[in-house]
Image: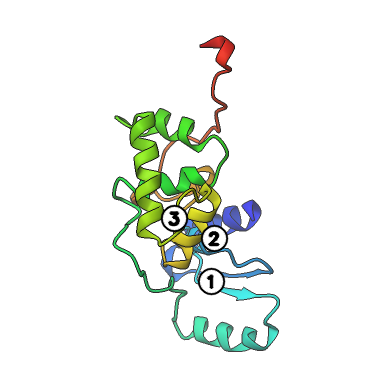
Amino acid sequence: MRSALKAVRLITSTFGSRGPKCVLHTSQPDLNDVWTFCALGGHNVVDKFRPTERARILWETLDGHRWKPPEQRTSVTITDALGRMLPYMELPHWKHNARRDLPGLSEGAAHQAKSRLVNTLGLEKGAESREIVTAANDHGLAWVPLSYRHLLPQDHPEHRPDRFKHRLPPRKSDV
């Protein structure tokens, strides 16, 4: 996946919007990966396990149609306080990393935000972070994973100039 993202970024930066159409062929069309591919300049996606749709999608792409995310079915956005937490929930130790990166986020605020996301997305109390991520995607929320945000154009709202470094929390004996 990283090679596809780097390739579409190179094509887009070299040719701009007049360049060749870029279509991702994948056996795992994960919503966040497709969102990232298109945020970097890609045009569409073909699921390798649905070969009968390939020709139609390629012709539509040549006609100027671009991939669109599913319609959003929740009031949460990726830019509000709750939505900004979702990319961290894709990773282990998400609370530690979110608290390091998001100013003013305490342990209590992270726990409260997780509970609010569980309620908003209609999940059962005690849902795991991975379940929250899946439910958010099912509700039409998509985001660029933290590890790819440095590849985005500088004017993209999810761009971050530095590469994300996953951090382990300190051991209790070190605190």
Question: In the picture, which quadrant includes the N terminus?
Answer: bottom right
The residue at the point 32 percent across, 57 percent down is 77
Circle 1: residue type? Pro
The residue that disc 2 covers is 11
Nearer-N-terminus badge (2/1): 2
Nearer the observer: mark 3 or 2; the answer is 3
Nearer-N-terminus badge (3/2): 2
14 shown above or below 106: below
Within 10 Å of disc 1 (Cα), the crowding (few <14, some 14-19, many 20+) is some
Alpha carbon separation for disc pair 3 and 1: 24 Å
Colouring chosen for the image of the structure: rainbow
Q: Position of residue 60 (x, y in %)?
A: 50, 86
The residue that disc 3 covers is 143
The residue at the point 51 percent across, 47 percent down is 129
Within 10 Å of disc 3 (Cα), the crowding (few <14, some 14-19, many 20+) is many
Q: Secondary structure at mark 2?
A: helix
Within 10 Å of disc 2 (Cα), the crowding (few <14, some 14-19, many 20+) is some
The residue at the point 43 percent across, 35 percent down is 98
The residue that disc 1 covers is 20
Q: Report whether 22 appears left or right of 63.
A: right
Nearer the observer: mark 3 or 1; the answer is 3
Q: Secondary structure at mark 3?
A: loop
> Do we see residue 150 in this rendering?
no
Residue closest to the eye, 80 or 117: 117
Nearer-N-terminus badge (3/1): 1
Q: Position of residue 117 (x, y in %)?
A: 38, 52
Classify residue 64 by image quadrant. Answer: bottom left
